[in-house]
Image: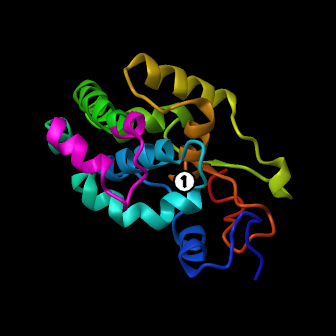
Amino acid sequence: MKRCGWVNQDPLYIDYHDHEWGVPVYEDRLLFEYLNLEGAQAGLSWYTILKKRENYRQAFDHFDANKIIKYDGKKIEELLHNEGIVRNKLKINAVITNAKAYLKVVEEFGSFSRYIWSFVGGKPIQNHFQDISEVPATTEISDKMSKDLKKRGFKFVGSTICYAFMQAVGMVNDHIESCICNTKGQAD
């Protein structure tokens, strides 16, 4: 069975590739989680973050934005000493900042899903790449998303992070043509 070239042999990574990456996500809390985990990945590998994902869920109250906006200095110190997550003060503070921005988006648009999926017209983009080397790091859409998220106060949402987020939550399907997970034509 052929998979995308970025997958290693770890069953955790294989399961993520086969059952999550590129599968459309519409649930607000899960979209918020993915956006923050992609931001945590900045300068690291997704594999590093994936191995820590359960720790992140525990540390950040399962990415419940209403709880996160109440984090104080004591909680931030606790997070900075949590060996189960990336202990980067800027990234930790970004989750709190993002929670506030996220709640404003939900208030304005009725849901984060409605807002974020509007960048692709509400449906996944099905790409037709033959090789992983063809997959872009950014696109015009990720540029636009990044710019708008930043304008709304989000942090760690550069265009590369936004495109990785779009791939993760199925806004784009970048499974290569020969991959067992490529759903040729379903989103066309």
Q: Was residue 90 drawn as part of the magenta stretch in this picture?
A: yes
* Res 79 visible: yes
- Reply above or below: 41 against 100: below
At horizontal 85% and vertical 58% (from top left) the residue drawn is 131
Q: Position of residue 84 (x, y in %)?
A: 37, 62
Which residue position is annotated with label 1?
168
What amino acid type is highlighted by mark number 1? Answer: Ala
Quadrant of the image for the N terminus?
bottom right
At horizontal 28% and vertical 49% (from top left) the residue drawn is 79
* Range shown magenta: 72-92
Snapshot quadrant of residue 36: top left
Q: Which of these two is toward me, 58 or 78? A: 78
Crowd rating for badge 1 (residues with CA inside 10 Å; few <14, some 14–19, many 20+)? many
- Reply above or below: 81 against 95: below
Q: Position of residue 140 (x, y in %)?
A: 67, 27
Q: Was residue 131 drawn as part of the magenta stretch in this picture?
A: no
Q: Position of residue 97 (x, y in %)?
A: 30, 30
Q: Secondary structure at mark 1?
A: helix
Snapshot quadrant of residue 57: bottom left
* Res 22 visible: no
Q: Which of these two is toward me, 85 or 35? A: 85
Q: Position of residue 110 (x, y in %)?
A: 25, 33
Residue situated furthest top in the rendering: 151
